[in-house]
Image (tube, coloured by chain):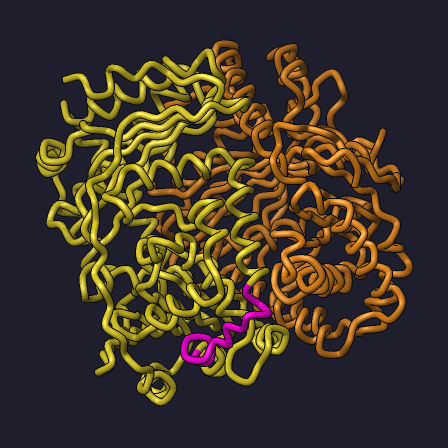
Chain colours: A yellow, B orange
Amino acid sequence: MAEDFFVREFPNGLTFLGQRMDHVSSAALTVAVPTGACHDPVTGQGAAAVASEWCLRGAGRRDTRQLNDALDALGCQHIESVQSEHILFSAASLGRNLPAVLDIYADILLRPRLEDSTFESCRALVAQELEGLEDEPMQKCAFLLRERFYPYPLGRSIYGTTESLRTITADIARKHLHRGLAPHGAILAVAGHVDMPKLCDQVERLLGDWPDCPTQAVETQPAQGGVVHIPKDSAQVHIAMAHAAAPMDDPSYYAARLAETVLSGGMSGRLFTEVREKRGLVYHVSTRYHSLKSHAGMFTYAATVGPKAQTTFEVILNELRRLGDGIEPDEILKSRAQLRSALVMQGESTHARSSALCQDWYHLHRLRDLAEISDHIEKVTVADVLEYLREFPPRRMTFLAIGPTSPDVAALNAQ
Amino acid sequence: MEFHRAVLDNGLTIVAESNPAAASMAVGFFVRTGSRDETADVAGVSHFLEHMVFKGTARRTPFDVNRDFDRLGAEYNAFTSEENTVYYGAVLPEYQTDLLDILGDILRPALRGEDFDMEKNVILDEIARYEDQPAYRVYEKLMGRYFDAHPLGNSVLGTPESIQALKCQDMQAYFDRRYSPGNVTVVAAGKVDFGALVAKVKSMCSGWKPYEVSRQIDPAGANPCCQAIVDVKVVREHIALMSPAPSSQDEARYAAGVLATILGDDNGSRLFYALVEPAIADEANMSHLSLDGTGAFLSFLSTDPARAAQAVRITREVFAAFLEKGPSDSELQAAKNKIASSATLKGELPMGRLVNVGFDWVYRRQYIPLAEQIELLLAVGGQEVLDLARRYDISAVTVLGLGPAEAI
């Protein structure tokens, strides 16, 4: 299946990416605007999260209800989300409706109403979501770990804090959006059953005049790291730890993905085998790779009942460390098959494709086709993965536990 | 798209929707059994058995099972509900036969004592995991309350006590009652080679001995009430509401889906405007649970504990207002468009079609191409939706809250 890519960079800094998919009838749109949580103003943490709600509260000539009605009438499924570096607007519909969906998104991006009357409920919703994290310890673990692991403020929680949310006013959020909701570095990707050249002309017509605004680089401080236990009267102890990995544009990126898969791919990965299958210590254990532009990490998570927490931690740490001692050829073969197959399956989904186009462009400034990725995966050898693990060993780990107790993690940073 | 069907001599049915344009294929073994088919003394056995099915056979150790799936690059798993246990995998089309070799094999598990004892720990951890998720707990408690003594009120996971007490021979006895070939449907979707599929399933499953399996389909009685379960460890108030709805076999299920979307879609529904837009709740949605011989409308709200009673009152007002006047034309059209679009997107993935084709067969012995389903959906009228809401009385809700609030 050869991919049919379309790329157009506009003078105002916006990039349009397209992938035509003839075997489907849908199309998906992803707009990544580089004004994610790490760009939040110091006095307004959580601003991007509030903004992503607020942008949908009326745009152009439509108020909230009219905007929803217009998207619903097109059968458009949409979701707005905030990441560290971007606010993402994702939408999917039948391909033939996508041009009309794009018209509406041009309003959302260029002419959000941002009225005082709709602000407060957006702020309140984010505050409630933040509070709701207390009832979802697994998610809370992920947020807090990321915050401590990445150089500050790159991993900062998208929700800010109860106090910071309280200080955000409509004016602060509006100012932030006027600066941040701009075409410079923004990516608009579409995958699916659409006439791409025609759609690109439409993008030019709608967004070609989107006024650019210079972006400010984020100043970072060293990562906080360390070991933290957040006491909570929960049924399980939630254990999370992270260590550095090669970012997506690093030559050893594919070796990193193979290392992740040997460790945690499928049910025969080492962690699942050793922690769950052989010892019955947990229901869930996994390591997941995550990359920002210039930093990446391997994030490991497990949850278990208190009495098993210490052993769970020790077995996990041992597996992370043991990986560098050697990998069987069969493990690499299996991991390659898993990665290649996942790639093909993602290639069937318009949504997964439009989001992958955005990622490729943001991290690599080019698009990779299936054959290229497959080829890279194929070429990674055991020696490459071991070499990678010497460069990115599971050392200097950030550790976080939520639960009634925490394991003793002295072994974590011992040599 | 082409539909195929075959039945083995022992009663095992094979159905497939073949899409030559797909890049992958998916297969599932749909076993018509779940927590509603359990007796109290083996509560949680269906789900525990689902785990044990991955623990090996006469010719595969648990590690072989995992390794063989992963060698194919398969995406695979299983799930257990009140009514079904489904084992599935998706692979590139060239691995269809290899995938079936594993699935067909593990569906006759060894159920070894040492594996059973080890996996018991995992199940207990899974129960603890859900204990930390109040949104799930309130669902489970509501099912118990709403269905009362009806077996649909049984917990899928069971309790720590029921799992601790469970013995391997109890599980074997349950397996021998429920996993007859006549109670299993092999379903495939995507780029399927049906001839090869039938040949492989035959070679794997022809030896399965058939026996009689039945399910009790008693009428389910609703139990309208409103109660707050106080748990001060929970921060938000998690509220679930349930009322009667059409069953899986009922043609009114299309209208029921439209009704749930108008009232409780995540975006742009009546509950959205009444609760989420003004930030009274950060979550408010409604769905239609279509079950075997019965059905239910299920809504979830997440609110500040102090506003829980207000949120429930507003939800009741939304339902009452709908019973008065029904949907507007634009609401009706928007709901239908959203459902059609979501079905189309899901239908583009073999895994999405697998579930749809599988449950159409399991519940109704019927195959309806996606395009035809969308036509049936688009034919739903506003009066039909209103009549349905009145016939089932959406205002007769059983309401449970879980969290710090003393009253809702």
Main SS class of the magenta portion in the image = helix
Residue B193 is left or right of residue B181, and the answer is: left
- Residue B368 horizontal/vertical position (percent): 66, 62
Q: Considering only vertical position in the picture, is B228 above or below B116?
A: below
**Quadrant (top left/top right/bottom left/bottom right) for the C terminus of chain A:** top left
- The range drawn in magenta is A106-119
Q: Position of residue B385 (x, y in %)?
A: 81, 67
Q: Nearer the viewer, residue A209 or A74?
A: A209
Residue A265, above or below A229: below
Judged left or right of residue A146, residue B341 is right
Asked whether residue B156 appears in the rendered view, the answer is yes
Closer to the camera in the image, A360 or A342: A360
**Within the image, what quadrant is residue B304 found in?**
top right
The residue drawn where x is 46% and y is 34% is: A138
Q: Quadrant of the N terminus of chain A?
A: bottom left
User: Is-magenta flag for residue B43?
Assistant: no
Residue B374 on image: x %, y %: 65, 70
Q: Which of B63 and B394 is in front in this view?
A: B394
Residue at the (66%, 23%) spot, across then down = B158
Task: Give the percent coordinates (x, y) of residue A58.
Answer: 55, 75
